[in-house]
Each structure stands twice: as C-alpha cells, then as structure tokens.
Amino acid sequence: MKNSYDVVVVGAGPAGSMAARYAARQGVSVLMLEKDRDVGYPVRCGEAVSKAGIEEFIESDPKFIASTINNFAFVAPDDTLVNLPLPEPGYILERRIFDYELAKSAAAEGAVILTRAYVNGLIIENDAVKGVKYEYEGEQHEVRAKVVVAADGVESRVGRWAGLKTYVDFRDMECCTQITAANIDVSQDTCYFYFGEEYAPQGYFWIFPKGDNTANIGLGVSGMIGRKRSAKSFLDHFMEKNYPEAPVLTRIAGGVPSVVTLDKISAPGIILVGDAARQVNPLSGGGIASGMIGGSIGGRIAGETIKLNKPDHLLTYDKAWHDRLGKRHETFDRIKDGIYNFSDEKFNSIASAVVKIPENERTLGKVFRSALLKNPSLLLDVAKVFI
C-alpha cells in the first residue's frame, strides 16, 4: 500500500463505490477502505430500487436482481388493497452481489480497494483534512490524501471528526427492522406497503418479494414511536398473525435518517456522501439510487478539485447535490410531514377513493392528491414531483 493517494474513500457501499469510480475515472489515484471483511455485507436494506435509478450507473443484470417489480400495492388498515401499476419497472436487488459489482466498476477505473480496514481517525492540519488513520491486520496505519470522502453510513463518525454537524434528531431517525423469510405466498412482481396503527404508525410496513416465495418483510416507524414500542414488536405481531410458520432466514435492524440533507456536507479536504450526508429520500426512506447519485457527484468534484489544483472547488459539492436532488428531497420531506399523522380512517378513505379509479389510470400522484385534497400547499409539492 502507498502512504498517500489523491482521494481516500471511507466505506464501500453504493455511494462510496460511485465516489471512488467517478474520481478514479479522471485519472487521480483513489483508495477505498471498507471496515468489513466483504463488500456488500452485512446487508441492511430493503433492497428496492427503480430500474432508472440503477441504470444511470450500471446495466441491469439478472445476477443481482432477485425480482422485477411492476406493481405497487397499498394496503389500508381495513385491508382494502389498491394496486397501482408502475410507470416503469423496479427491482428487488441482491445487495451482496450488487454492491460487489459496483465496487468492481470502481476497481476497473483504477481504484484500489482494501477490506477489513477500520478507519479510526483523521489527519487534520491547519483546519483541513489531510488523510485518515486506520487499523489493518492489527497494525495502525496512516494514509494521506488531498480529499477524503466519508461514505461510512448513517453512523458516520468521519464527518463528525472533521467538525461537520452530523447529528440527527431522534424524531427524524426511523426505527427499522426487517427479516427475509421463506414460504411467503405473494405476487412476485408486486411491492406491498401497509399503513396504519397496527402495522407501522408514523411510517409504513413492507413486503418486497425476492422470488421463490421468499421476501423481505419489515417496517420503519418514527423515533417518537420507537421510544414507546419497538419496531420488532410490530414485525413479530404481523408475522404471528399472517405467516406464523414462515422460516426466517435473516434478521436486521437499524436507523434510517428520513430527513433532509445535512446543512453542510463539505469542508476543507472532505465531503460526505450517501447516508453519511443524509441523502436518503425522506418520504420513502430509500437511499440506494440517491446515494449513488451523491457519490458520483462527490467523486467527480473530488477529481476535478485535484486536477484543477483548486482546494476550494471541493466546496461546490453542496450546491451540486442540492441542484440535482437535495431540493427535491426537501419537497418530499414536506409531503412526508403532511401525511405523517394520518389516522386509520384517513388511510381507509384514501384507499376507498383510489380503488374507484380504473386500475390503468391509477398513479402515485393521484394517490397523493387524494390524500392531500384539503392541503393546497402540499398539493403544489405533489405536483412538482409527480406531474
């Protein structure tokens, strides 16, 4: 290993791999450090993504696609099911394979990858980040860099060490848990979303099929709900009621920052991408595609910064992200706040109204317009993103 690189990326998830790839593509030297033994493991994700969301960066490949999704099913508290055909296909991924392929695409551009490298500090000189400290095979190392990219997930410490304010209020941190279970008899081309007090108050419950009658089944609830009752208890109740004999293959839990991007995601010598920057869609909690977008923007700007030899160019990253997706996420956050505290009766009335629309005319936009009919300001936000 060299003791200096132009760019050091901390974390080899989708955002980190795209940052490494787009920086290396410009001919600068890149090192990506991953704390775990394997890229893509452990999987802490619902694994749902749109086709367009991944094909901006990698060609769809059956080896990392567990199922193709053509429908969105909204299940109300009274069990009314509203099926909505999707305007374009979506996928449920095999993240272990998908993340591997993204990391390989970074390596193909020239990035060096080191796993089991635990970053435990930064090199800071004259108030600027100049590299990282890490442990590898029981020994402490340092590697200097002109740019450090923090892609170390929702629990990111790297940005905090650099003085960036990475704190998220617990009320904006979704408490999530998920199992992958077998013998789940649902349509394999449909994602199911359940709403209401029984399933996931101030959040939603999901079933994402993965082929062969296996599925990711989980939920996310607000931090306020999570303080009173665990997400796991909602999941256990659902499984006991609906699939009491289903074998559970995996179980995961964690927090998802369903909030707008951090106020500041760059500082001298460092940028934050993906979950570390809070680039998750606040409405859906999805972060794969948006993390890849954030990583690609960050990697491109990191490479430009080095090639131009203009350190301040790195600070343009905040605006570039905001212009591409950050502003849109602010709109999604307002919509989320508008529907957060809907009663079961409200969800039932929405389902009752939408189910009357012919299936081939149903859209997510019409669902949200029905939900927010008495809130004109939020209807304008819905129009911005769905029309």
Image (cartoon, rainbow, N blue to C red):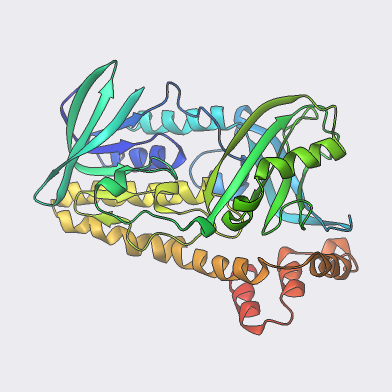
In-front residue for pair 338/234? 234
Image point 86% across, 71% down: which residue? 353
Q: Residue at x 73, y 68 (%)?
A: 342
Residue 8 or 59: which is nearer the viewer?
Answer: 8
Residue 129, relative to residue 30: is it above or below? below
Q: Quadrant of residue 96?
A: top right
Which residue occupies the extreme top position in the image? 137
Which of the 4 image quadrants contains residue 121? Answer: top left
Q: Residue at x 30, y 43 (%)?
A: 158
On screen, residue 46 above or below 98: below
Residue 326 is situated, as x and y percent measured from the top left of the image, at 44, 63
What residue sits 61% from the left and 45% below the top? Answer: 176
Q: Nearer the viewer, residue 254 or 386?
A: 254
Which quarter of the rendered picture does the C terminus lie within? bottom right
Taking the image as shown, residue 62 lies to the left or right of residue 359, namely left
Residue 109 image position (x, y, % from top left)? 34, 33
Left or right placement of residue 320 versus residue 316 in this view: right
Residue 239, visible in the rendered structure = yes
| Quadrant occupied by the N terminus | top left
